[in-house]
Amino acid sequence: MKLLVSFSKKKGSEPLIAKIVRDTGVLINVNRAYIESMSGEMLIEVPDADSKIVCEKLISSGAEVEVLEDSVFRDEDECIDCGACISICPQEVFYFDEDWHLHMNEEKCVLCGKCTEACPHGALSIYD
């Protein structure tokens, strides 16, 4: 399960992810992180079975947590299968089939947004 975690260092300066891993024993994959001097946001991935305990620990540590159900949304009526998203995606989410139709492996998506910026038809969006 993918979780978007926002936090403020005003609420504490402990290493948040390390503390959660230590306290729960759950391995957490950090897909991306943007951290400034006083706040930050991380996209993390945790096993579905452990998501409840991780969410509870994050919230009790002062973080805000949003469960992300979807990856990038692709409007198939707008998409022209040009492949601009393929070349820009750092996670290789997009690929062509043998008939040159565009497909997505949504599990790989880390919601970086690079594909949405590169799409010439605006067929890709985050948080549909």
Image: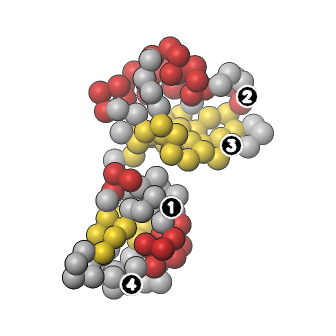
**Mark closer to the observer (3, 4):** 4
Q: Is residue 85 visible?
A: yes
Which is more N-terminal, label 4 or label 3? 3
Rounded to the nearest angstrom, the CA distance separating label 4 from label 1 is 17 Å
Residue type, label 2: Lys
Residue type, label 4: Cys
User: What's the mark number on residue 35?
Assistant: 3
**Residue position marked by numbered label 2 in the rendering:** 10
Tell me which corner region of the image, top left, top right, bottom left or bottom right, holds residue 126. Answer: bottom left
Rounded to the nearest angstrom, the CA distance separating label 1 from label 2 is 33 Å
Q: Residues within 10 Å of mark 4 (few under 14, many from 20)?
A: some
**Residue position marked by numbered label 1 in the rendering:** 90
Quarter of the figure that contains the C terminus: bottom left
Which residue is nearer to you in this view: 50 or 5? 50
Secondary structure under the numbered disc 3 in the rendered image = strand
Which residue is nearer to you in this view: 64 or 99? 99
**Mark closer to the observer (1, 3):** 1
